[in-house]
Amino acid sequence: AYNNIHHPSKLVVGADLHCFKHKIEPKWEDPVCANGGTWKMSFSKGKSDTSWLYTLLAMIGHQFDHEDEICGAVVSVRGKGEKISLWTKNAANETAQ
């Protein structure tokens, strides 16, 4: 539920939070992700909460163009900042990338 969404700014340094489509594991070894790629966005420490929320809502609401190419999203919290990665199924699909 919306009220249970974890905010990256509240996570400890070193944490990774994954949200992937049903039956897709957040690892490159998953057959669906094996030929995929990523879109990455970097943020200053504590500044990714809104973008993470909008990314999750866009995934859940099927708002991305080529949404069938999206495997999931990851937010990574590190000492210098945070990074949101959107994983795609096919890095060779230039239209979707």
Image (cartoon, helix red, strand yellow):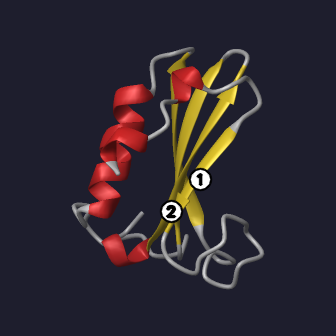
Residue at x 70% of width, y 24% of height: 12
Compare residues 35 and 76 and report the one nearer the observer.
Answer: 76
Residue 97 versus residue 77 in the image, above or below: below
Is 39 placed above or below 14 here? below
Q: Nearer the viewer, residue 91 or 9?
A: 9
Q: Which mark is residue 81?
A: none
**Residue hosting label 2:** 72
Q: Does the CB distance between marks 1 and 2 fall below 8 Å?
A: yes
Amino acid type of the residue that numbered disc 1 sits on in the rendered structure: His
Q: Quadrant of the C terminus?
A: bottom left
Q: Which residue is mark 1?
A: 18
Point out residue 21 in the picture as x, y percentages from the top left corner: 48, 72
Task: Give me the C-alpha separation between circle 1 and circle 2.
Answer: 7 Å
| Residue 85: percent from left, percent from top | 54, 47
Q: Determine crowd level at label 2: few under 14, some 14-19, many 20+ residues with C-alpha closer than 10 A.
A: many
The quarter holding residue 64 reads: bottom left
Residue 77 position, x and y percent, is 66, 29
**Nearer the N terminus, badge 1 or badge 2?**
1
Relative vertical location of residue 59 with respect to residue 57 in this rendering, above or below: below
Q: Give the residue furthest to the bottom.
A: 31
* Residue at horizontal 73 percent and vertical 16 percent from the top: 79
* Image vertical order of residue 44 relative to residue 50, above or below: above
As helix, strand or loop, the secondary structure at mark 2 comes to strand
Q: Residue at x 42, y 38 (%)?
A: 52
